[in-house]
Amino acid sequence: MPDTENPTPPEAPSQGASPASTHEPERRAAGAGPAVARVPDRRSAGRSDAPPSSERGNDELPRYQKEHDTPLKLAWRVVTSRWRALRDKAGRDFMRRTLRIGVSARIFHPEPGSTGLRSKNLQYLEESIAQWVMSRDVLVFMVPTVNTNGLLHPSNITLRHYARHLDGLVLQGGADVSPQTYSEAPTRPEWSGDRARDLYELELLHEFIDAGKPVLGICRGCQLINVAFGGSLYQDVATNVPDAIEHVHKDYDAHRHVVHFPEGSMLARMFPKQPRALVNSIHHQAVKDLGRDITIEAVSDADGIIEAIRYQRADFVMGLQWHPEFHRAGGVDLLECTPILDEFLRAARETRF
């Protein structure tokens, strides 16, 4: 029978063993899991009975921090650093973003009695004008006519949406401007022009101007800019100005003549060492009476026919009577028109927002 009054005392813990280790078997037997190291109690910091610093967590700031730094100062530096990074990125994106330039559509109307594609309304652009604009690494989009009241395909998209989302507009050449658009009757049936295209492009032009976007008009586009502000046209230069040189010829874009830039004009500033230049000539209509706030930018040397105009109440709204997109293929004698295109694109970048 064991002696219950004097039980055998437990063995003393070995030297260096912690008190917790003596009860390890008991905890494991009780299902308490593996032993967990004791976490220092930082709440005891500063008390007289607190353990030495070697047994406490280190509450001091990292040694790389500034002396006497505060959370507020650190937060301010983080915010300003982030702001500088975002500002620099926005600046890079602003400068690198590819410009989007709209080009008005030429319109092919159905031919009576035709079949197939010629029996349809077609909208298209001439390849050279698109490639000339794209030569400066910009995107080109043809802007179609819109039909908000159509029976088959009605849409809420308007030309204003194009003016809002594109950075500039090129009015390409093509059919005559209808005399009805500048309150005249055509003196010959073949000079009736394209009234439907006039209405579409006039709305498009005004939407881009109202949006503060630049516009460059080519040939017909030059004439349309003048008419948009109340100007008029010679319906046929050879008929209305008998002493004028030929401005249209069977040679098409190989036909050319000399123009000069009036002193003080934007074109004179673009070409300071070239007061006169050789350009192609493919037009039988021409600017007659200037519209309001329209100024002359170039004149035909031989007969005084207006060859380029600019609308003064906008940063860049210019019309050229010649076709700059054909000049490079026409030889080195013709005016190099890249400075005009670059000025137009700079205006597009500056007014994009």
Image (cartoon, helix red, strand yellow):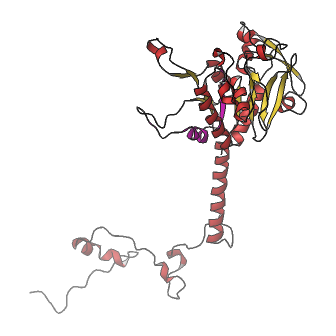
Between 68 and 249, the residue placed more toward the observer is 249
**Would you say 10 lies left or right of 42 here?**
left
Q: Position of residue 120 (x, y in %)?
A: 47, 19
Tell me, yes or no, if residue 213 can be seen here: yes
Which quarter of the rendered picture does the N terminus lie within? bottom left
Against 8, residue 164 (above or below) is above
- What's the residue at 78%, 33% (across, down)? 310
The tally of labels here is 0
Q: Position of residue 6 (x, y in %)?
A: 19, 91
Between 326 and 84, the residue placed more toward the observer is 326
Against 78, residue 307 (above or below) is above
**Segment tinted magenta in the rendering:** 154-174
- What's the residue at 64%, 43% (across, down)? 93
Q: Position of residue 40 (x, y in %)?
A: 45, 76
Find out whether residue 162 is within the magenta segment. yes
Against 331, residue 167 (above or below) is below
In the figure, residue 26 lies in which quadrant? bottom left
In the figure, residue 290 lies in which quadrant? top right
Find out whether residue 235 is within the magenta segment. no
Q: Position of residue 247 (x, y in %)?
A: 77, 14
Between 78 and 328, the residue placed more toward the observer is 328
| Residue farthest to the top, as pictured | 250
